[in-house]
Image (cartoon, rainbow, N blue to C red):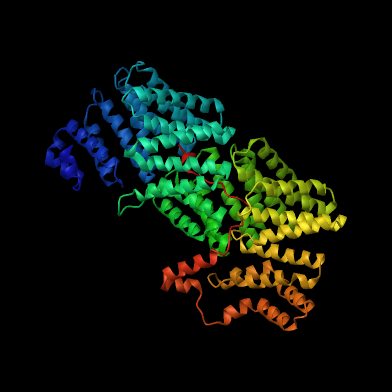
Amino acid sequence: MGVVNRLAGSGASVLAHFLGYHRDPHRQARAGWRWARAAANGPGVVRLSHGIDLMTRAVDAIDPGHPKVAKYHSRLCWALRIRYERSGDRGDLDRAVLFGRRSVDAAPGDRELFRRRTRLVGALIARFLVTGAASDLDTAIAEARSALDGVPPSHPHRAGLMSNLGYALLARFDGTGNPADLDAAIAMARLAVGLGRRRHTDPAVARANLSIMLESRFQHTAAVADLDEAIALGRHNVAADRSRLAVHQNNLSNVLLTKFEHTNDPGLLDEAISLARAAVDATPQGRPPPADIASTLAAALTDRSRHRGAFTDVEAGIATARLAVAATPAGDVRRAGRLSNLGVALRSRYHRIGAAADLDEAVAVGRQAVAAAPANQAVSAALHGNLAGALLNRFWRHDTLGDLDEAITVMDQVAAAARTDRTDHLTSLSVALLARYHRTADAVDLDRAVTVARQAAGLAEAGEPRAMGRTRALHQLSKALLEQYRRSAAADLDEVLSVARAAVAGVPADQAMGADCRSTLGRVLATRFDRDHDIADLDEAIDSWASASATVTASTRTRLEAMSRWGDATGVRHDLAAALPMYADVIGLLPVLAWRGIAAADRRYLLQTTTVTAASDAAAAALAAGCPSRSLTLLEQGRGVLWSQLLELRTDLDRLQRAHPDLAGALAACRAGLDGPDDPAPPVRWGRNRVR
């Protein structure tokens, strides 16, 4: 093996000739195996391909009845599957299954049969994840059981075989949703962990598999004990197995992200990002980080940007998501999820700076992700849901009814089929239906938006694993009920208020979502004030809008709307002059909304759709306060925001980006730091452990 490694830079045929292996196919097969194993731990496929070529030529030259052919076929099965994972070539996967089957059938009584069955199981599961063929998965489980049954209880590899069977059962659970498979997988993984402590089998692998299985069961049952145990197992591996530290850090980061979604504890999110960064930093200098690790970091950064509004997280999330996509071959089953995560990150930036190009790219990569969707139903639902969210956002931007109709069709299908994240999928469907009601005034859409939002809220109350999932569902229900009341007084306004209050109570005041919820609460209170004329409702509405407008993590659009409503309500409560500070603040924020870093068309859109009457409202308030000169100033300031930018001799950010990218990035960070996320159709994070 030392000779093979030292000559790894030369061609396979040169090596074979140099060593004389071309005259002895058995020696050639052994050399190919050594080459493949040595190359399996490094990047790329060239050296691995050399080993596969050597082994292939060897088995072609050996009598099919030779007793060692089964071993050579099994090794080819393993090497071809590894190359498939790097290149995405389906031909390699089919050949891996073919050679694996031949290896098992060739020597049924061999003492190494368990090893050959295990390699065949790996190839069958990999092919199932691509094709969704249930027969492959059923065969894999049968072979895994046979491998386990074929060794005695004292066999040193029994723990590993148990872990493999659990992995196969988990894959079938992901495909069918049968909880019996998941429970059996966890039971098998627990046995593997116990045996691993007493035998030379590596217990870290068994712990990692058990952690993934427990996190998966939590997603379906919301049993917090499972999630806590998964985290404990991950922490154990990080502390105990330094040889694969980056892998364990990545796995633990994924589980902590799930815990954050359940608890909304910002400390967990920060820890998840720290672990993912450490895993990325462990990459040897000069090499890109592994795609799965980059994908985890990208998802975590995007999550934090949506909750805290740090634009540096948005930019870093997009850059890291692009790295993950670039490092994943076109045929790799995991590429779809990484494309979808990139789309989520782009949507996050769109909601921060309003550039339509980000939204168009989010739709484009979302379509690519759906086209490459694996057979796994849970993964497919997440990919379709994220595409639908991007289409809904693009409808709001361009008023393209076709995008909205497509989004609703996709969301309907996803909500009906999804087994996890169903609360979020139903909430997004209600958002889209309410948007179409606003566009077409079709009461059927409004009634259905209320019904679907009630279903989402009911699921959330019954045990939604995500803390923010419950808040989003309640917030959407309050908005849909409010529209229903305004249309026909069919809704109970007191119920609407109760739901809106529950939404506000479910989110910290300093988070962007909190500003949205408080702004909606203000609208409900103002509506009840219009009906009952209770001044306490108006005072509480004013307080809600004041609080929302002061939330620095909220989007500029959310803050502008809250400030405008705050000013309107203050004018009713006191007089128009008292509303002057709020209206003046609205005018002051307009340049932040329509900043020069985005295209002129984007600026016009944001100004036209956000504050149509801002300048006249501010001018009228100044006149009422006896300040005619300030009235004129505010009027010209509000109306001249866009014109002043267009007439000034300054370049748009795209030109600055080409000439001085560092300065352009700093400018973008400064502006976006004043803005925040605002995405009423929340994305579903697609993590590494969604595909096994």
Residue 276 in picture, x, y percent from top left: 42, 47
Q: Is residue 577 visible?
A: yes
The residue sitting at the right extreme is 532
Q: Residue at x 47, y 55 (%)?
A: 317
Residue farthest toward the bottom in the current orientation of the protein:
629
Q: Residue at x 75, y 73 (%)?
A: 617
On the image, the x and y values in percent for residue 482 come to: 78, 52
Quadrant location of residue 520?
bottom right
Image quarter hosting the C terminus: top left
Foreground residue, 483 or 412? 483
Q: How many marks?
A: 0
**465 on left or right of 652:** right
Vertical relation: 555 (above or below) 661: above
Can the viewer see residue 399?
Answer: no
Percent position of residue 270, x then y: 48, 49
Q: In this view of the protein, which residue sits in the foreground, 404 or 431?
A: 431
> Does residue 112 sit above or below 524 in this rendering?
above
Image spot of residue 95 (x, y percent):
35, 36
Question: Is 287 on the left-hand or right-hand side of 433?
Answer: left
Question: Is 551 rendered above or below residue 32?
Answer: below
The one of 314 and 691 positioned closer to us in this rendering? 314
Dividing the picture into quarters, in which one does residue 47 lie? Answer: top left
Residue at x 46%, y 43% (from the top left corner) = 253
Side of 659 relative to 80 (left or right): right
Left or right: 308 in relation to 416: left
Quarter of the figure with the N terminus:
top left
In the depicted view, which residue is nearer to us: 8 or 581?
581
